[in-house]
């Protein structure tokens, strides 16, 4: 099954899934079991949804793939939403809604699951703990909650600025790259003797840490991919270095 799955390199992921993988296991009771019921276990490894900002530098073929992926996930979400609404209205006089499973090939495969009242759904998300991928992690969780129909359970609290305990006591003046201002980013690049064009005013540490090498080439490196790769790698090395030091200081502060 894995060999049939389409993957390709993108700006965000070198082995990005460009198709959904579906495995169906049919459970059939023995012929002598008159009370047995047929069952189907459907396992779907869905290709991740893609943000517009992540696919803006893709080729036309990759952009079409991203569009198809997002459309099929949207169709899946709609089918699950309508099925949930029908289940809530069971026993009432309201007319059942038609589940739009014909909107994509993915949902066509799940027609039986959408039509059976005893069908169960479980959604699992794969996320990364890296601080630089926080935005992607949040989007993945929101997408999964949307698919599972649990968006009403999402609550967002007040934005908090958190500082390591070591900073509170003045033990460290290190600042993670994602927290750099525009000026701090420019000074760091100059210190590293990395050539670059003028940094736009709207580009700071948070923005640049979300950029791929292709995006860096377009916005900071005047089309030079070698310089863009150097900046991309250097930023991540610096982020890892600062993160390691701050973690060690937090451990010492707890003792």
Image (tube, helix red, strand yellow):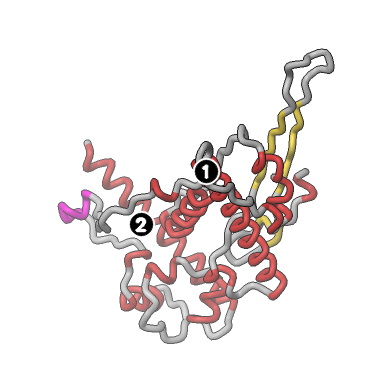
Give the secondary structure at mark 2.
helix
Answer few, some or many: residues within 10 Å of disc 2's Cα (few below 14, many 20 plus, some between 14 and 19). some
At x 66%, y 37%, the residue is: 116
Query: Outermost residue, front direction?
Result: 93
Q: Are marks 2 and 1 in contact (CB under 8 Å)?
A: no
Quarter of the image holding residue 102? Answer: bottom right
Q: Which residue is mark 1?
A: 93
Q: Which residue is mark 2?
A: 242
Q: Position of residue 235 (x, y in %)?
A: 44, 66
The mark total stands at: 2
Residue 208 shown left or right of residue 104 in the figure: left
Q: Position of residue 218 (x, y in %)?
A: 54, 81
Query: Outermost residue, left direction?
Result: 169
Give the secondary structure at mark 1.
loop
Q: Give the magenta range.
A: 165-171
Query: Outermost residue, right direction?
Result: 31
Taking the magenta stretch, the answer to whether it contains residue 34 is: no
Q: Nearer the viewer, mark 2 or mark 1?
A: 1
Q: Position of residue 21 (x, y in %)?
A: 71, 47
The correct choice, above or below, for 61 with respect to 95 in the image is below
The correct choice, above or below, for 116 with respect to 105 in the image is above
Q: Could you tell which of marks 2 and 1 lies nearer the N-terminus?
A: 1
Q: Position of residue 86 (x, y in %)?
A: 55, 44
Answer few, some or many: residues within 10 Å of disc 1's Cα (few below 14, many 20 plus, some between 14 and 19). few
Query: Which circle marks residue 195 in the picture?
Result: none
At x 63%, y 51%, the residue is: 98
At x 37%, y 69%, the residue is: 205
Residue 95 shown left or right of residue 152 in the figure: right
At x 59%, y 55%, the residue is: 48
């Amino acid at each position: 099954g894995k060999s049939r799955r389409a993957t390709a390199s993108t700006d965000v992921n070198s082995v990005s899934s460009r198709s959904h993988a579906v495995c169906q296991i049919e459970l059939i009771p023995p012929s002598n079991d008159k009370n047995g019921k047929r069952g189907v276990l459907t396992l779907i490894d869905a290709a991740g949804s893609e943000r517009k900002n992540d696919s803006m530098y893709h080729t036309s073929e990759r952009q079409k793939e991203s569009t198809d992926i997002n459309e099929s996930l949207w169709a899946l979400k709609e089918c699950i939403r309508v099925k949930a609404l029908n289940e809530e209205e069971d026993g009432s006089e309201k007319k059942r809604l038609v589940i739009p499973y014909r909107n994509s090939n993915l949902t066509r495969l799940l027609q039986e699951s959408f039509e059976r009242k005893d069908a169960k759904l479980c959604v699992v998300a794969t996320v990364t703990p890296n601080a630089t991928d926080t935005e992607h992690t949040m989007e993945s969780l929101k997408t999964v909650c949307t698919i599972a129909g649990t968006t009403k359970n999402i609550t967002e609290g007040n934005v908090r600025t958190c500082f390591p305990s070591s900073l509170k006591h003045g033990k460290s003046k290190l600042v993670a790259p994602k927290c750099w201002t525009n000026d701090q980013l420019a000074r760091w690049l100059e210190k590293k003797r990395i050539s670059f064009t003028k940094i736009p005013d709207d580009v700071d540490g948070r923005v640049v840490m979300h950029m791929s090498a292709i995006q860096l080439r377009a916005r900071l490196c005047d089309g030079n991919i070698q310089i863009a790769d150097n900046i991309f790698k250097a930023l991540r090395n610096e982020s890892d270095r600062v993160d390691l030091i701050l973690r060690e200081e937090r451990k010492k502060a707890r003792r």
